[in-house]
Amino acid sequence: MIIDCHGHFTTAPQPLADWRERQVAAVGDPANAPDEGDLVITDDELREAIEQNQLRMMDKRGSDLTVFSPRASFMAHHIGDFEVSSTWSRICNDLVHRVSTLFPERFAMGAMLPQSPGVDPATVVPELRRAVEELGAVVVNLNPDPSGGHWTAPPLTDRSWYPVYEAMCELDVPAMVHVSTSCNDAFHTTGAHYLNADTTAFMQLVQGDLFADFPTLRLVIPHGGGAVPYHWGRFRGLAMALGRPDPVELLENVSFDTCVYHQPGLDLLTEVVPSSAVLFASEMIGAVRDIDPDTGHHFDDTKRYVDATPNLTDTEREAVYSGNALRVYPRLAARLAAGQ
């Protein structure tokens, strides 16, 4: 079985974006905010959006199931206040839940959280619980920078995040550490901000003792771990200088995905990072959608790279494709075991 642990609903029907535009326009003027009931998207519209896009590409590329969450750049936690983010999160989560019920054998739900700059992270716990317990989410996306590129939040090791981790451990659900749109002109959203955040999150973990307090907490750092595998020696050296354990110890709790869009990058990831800490993913349909003129294949067809790398044995490759995901996402494993 091939499980893609990183997919977003980037092809949602247009009424979703239209509703969001109205919501954003009403920020600061709640009397004119759209009602949640104003958004109408039929099951047929959802089927068309999925069948003509993600499902078609999954069948073409040979993946079986995608962990599917709201569009990352649409989370935009920096817009409005907590109430705006809470309403938007609820709408987006309900939508991907519907996708997972329309295509239960092909999609498992991931959830966004109603984060907002300067707001206590504990405020996201009710929606986290609803998404997991009522909607069936198998992972949540945790934004380490709700400010959108200005990095006003404390590091992920700060105790202000602990109520979120406590709920995650209680529910036995991991988080993918994933930022959203950058509103800082210095950082392109998908070319800089995403990769900066992946790298920053890992360094925060190197500096802290988070997993001493939460030994069962599991985090997934996407996009191949940002710069981490490429600079693994730097992180090991910094850990020594700071009197911290070797970063390899973090990989008991931290995994990287394979959203790396060329063969040399995937080869480096699988050479540096133990295969037990690598999860297959493509983020399809996502930031990079074109065909690589050098190969004639889509940049984000990451299965080709995993199949071709010489750094994995057949057993390790199978674990990257499914076994590791089933360990990191136990609610997904339970769902599949139950035939749901």
Image (spheres, rainbow, N blue to C red):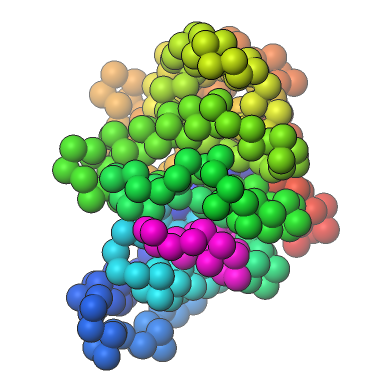
User: With respect to residue 33, does 163 lie above or below?
Assistant: above
Foreground residue, 62 or 108?
108
Q: Position of residue 330 (x, y in %)?
A: 75, 48
User: With respect to residue 129, does 59 lie above or below?
Assistant: above
User: Quadrant of the rendered structure where residue 296 is?
Assistant: top left
Left or right of residue 248, residue 32 in this image: left
Viewport quadrant of the N terminus:
top right
Task: Mark yes or no: residue 56 visible.
Answer: no
Left or right of residue 273, residue 265 in this image: left
Foreground residue, 320 or 229?
229
Q: Is residue 116 magenta?
A: yes
Residue at 62% from the left image edge and 51% from the top image edge? 162
Foreground residue, 171 or 287?
171
- Residues rendered magenta in the picture: 100-128
Task: Mark yes or no: residue 319 visible.
Answer: yes
Viewport quadrant of the C terminus:
bottom right
Q: Position of residue 131 (x, y in %)?
A: 61, 67
